[in-house]
Image: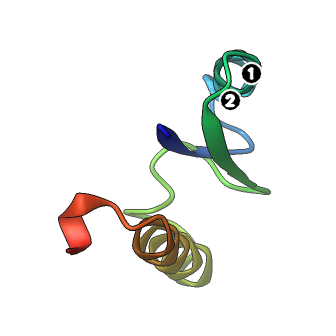
Amino acid sequence: MTSVLIITAEQDSLAKEADLYAEKLQKAGIEVTYKKYKGTVHGFIHSGSLEKAESAWHFIRDTLKNKKYTLFK
């Protein structure tokens, strides 16, 4: 089964589009892991709150490992 990971920043100018994209993928039967980080802006993973950035990086790592993507085999 195809899986998709989508992470957005709450105050990103494209957050609404990400919401709609995740919804469309789910309706198409694709497994979607979707997380929106509150109080963040575009690029928060590379700058801004270290705590939120680290949280996002750990979430990405854990999600990819748990989904058994070939990258981690």
Compared with 42, 16 (above or below) is above
Q: Secondary structure at mark 2?
A: helix
Question: Residue 60, labelled with which disc?
Answer: none
Q: Position of residue 73 (x, y in %)?
A: 20, 74
Determine which quarter of the picture holds residue 55: bottom right
Compared with 63, 35 (above or below) is above
Viewer-side residue, 27 vs 36: 27
Q: Residue at x 55, y 73 (%)?
A: 59
Q: Position of residue 54 (x, y in %)?
A: 50, 81
Determine which quarter of the picture holds residue 15: top right
Apparent side of residue 26 relative to residue 4 in the rendered image (left or right): right
Q: Secondary structure at mark 1?
A: helix
Question: Residue 16, labelled with which disc?
Answer: 1
Q: Which residue is mark 2?
A: 15
Circles 2 and 1: CB atoms closer than 8 Å: yes
User: How many numbered badges does the structure rendering display?
Assistant: 2
Q: Residue at x 52, y 67 (%)?
A: 48
Viewer-side residue, 7 vs 43: 7
Q: Check disc 1 and give the amino acid type.
A: Lys
